[in-house]
Amino acid sequence: MTVGIQPSKLIDGKAVANTLTTQIAADVAALRSATGKVPGLAVILVGEDPASAVYVAYKHRQTLAVGMASFEHKLPADTNQDDLLSIVNELNQDPSVHGILVQLPLPSQIDPNMVLNAIDPTKDVDGFHVQNAGRLATGQEGFVPCTPRGCLLLLKHRLGDLAGLHAIIVGRSNIVGKPMAQLLLAENCTVTVAHSRTRELPALCRMADILVAAVGRAEMIRGDWIKPGAVVVDIGVNRVTQGGKPRLVGDVAFAEAAHVQAITPVPGGVGPMTIACLLANTLSAFRHTLAARNN
Ligand code: NDP
């Protein structure tokens, strides 16, 4: 629903993602003609979390749609850590697999850091391996987590140069908030990271030129927390029931945000960019493999 927001203020993540995936599909086709090979993405899903199952199915379809190979590994919820680690290890060794993604969250018997750090960093297309996180933090080339990378592309698409803008990120997770902060810092924004212990959050948010919401609480950020003219990126995906119907809403009270300069809708904003960036990272991993073989 886009009630109260002028269409020109909407940041159309679907359209930007389509442009990106069209280019990726063309590059994959060209590389296939030149080498006879295509990038391969392996996705591991442990358990039956319904939201995760939907994401994995969507990733599978999109991977095939750009001409890549897709390998799905669906494991039961009671899979033990050693079994999962041995699958990761097999995929690390498999030359037809260029990217490996372990869908989070994992069941409680499995330590996610142990698994993420077992992925070959050159196949870590989610960018969650500690080596890639360190590379991002120190300004070195590496895989960047897909959601923050997608958000940055949307911000640059809308605003161009971000230097000097005050970016406030609400949320500090390793997979979204922290890498988002690193990326915006690298763009010369002044960055503030807020979290559940932050004091006076509404007043803080009102200072943002760029407000990024990555909390996971339906419509927590109200319209009067947003400075007139701010650009808002809503990463949150929350399933709610409104008027007896299931709906997806973001972390921002979208209908109250008419005074923004621009805002990403939920759905149709950040979500499509996450998948497009996953495919972009997989293509990069494939190119690195080809380059390494030619050296
Ligand atoms: P996490 O639960 O890991 O992190 C949530 C963050 O929000 C934490 O840092 C937490 O603070 C902070 N927080 C929680 N409550 C409050 C509060 N009342 N005030 C201020 N901060 C608060 O979530 P993720 O980072 O994994 O995901 C965030 C959202 O983004 C979710 O809705 C998720 O579904 C969505 N998402 C969307 C993607 C997409 O492709 N569109 C991809 C990935 C995630 P603290 O650290 O203090 O606990």
Image (cartoon, helix red, strand yellow):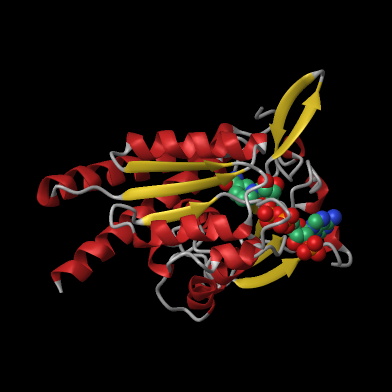
x, y percent for residue 255: 74, 34
The correct choice, above or below, for 189 with respect to 92 in the image is: below
Instruction: Say whether residue 212 is visible.
Output: no
State the residue lying farthest toward the left.
Answer: 34
- Residue that extends furthest to the bottom in the rendered view of this protein: 138
Relative to 111, 158 lies left or right: left
Q: Position of residue 204 (x, y in %)?
A: 80, 64
Q: Quadrant of the C terminus?
A: bottom left
Give the x, y percent position of residue 53. Answer: 58, 36
Name above or below for residue 92 compared with residue 270. Answer: below
Count of labels in the image: 0
Q: Nearer the viewer, residue 2 or 97?
A: 97
Asked if residue 146 can be seen in this view, the reply is yes
Q: Residue at x 39, y 62 (%)?
A: 92
Q: Residue furthest right?
A: 199
**Quadrant assignment for the N terminus:** top right
Residue at x 49% of width, y 51% of height: 154
Q: Is residue 148 left or right of residue 157?
A: right
> 195 or 222, which is in the foreground?
195
Q: Nearer the viewer, residue 117 or 74?
A: 74
From the viewer's side, name the closer residue of 118 and 253: 118
Q: Quadrant of ligand 1?
A: bottom right
| Residue 60 position (above or below residue 34) | above
Q: Residue drawn at (78%, 42%), measured in percent from left and top?
A: 219
Q: Position of residue 102 (x, y in %)?
A: 53, 53
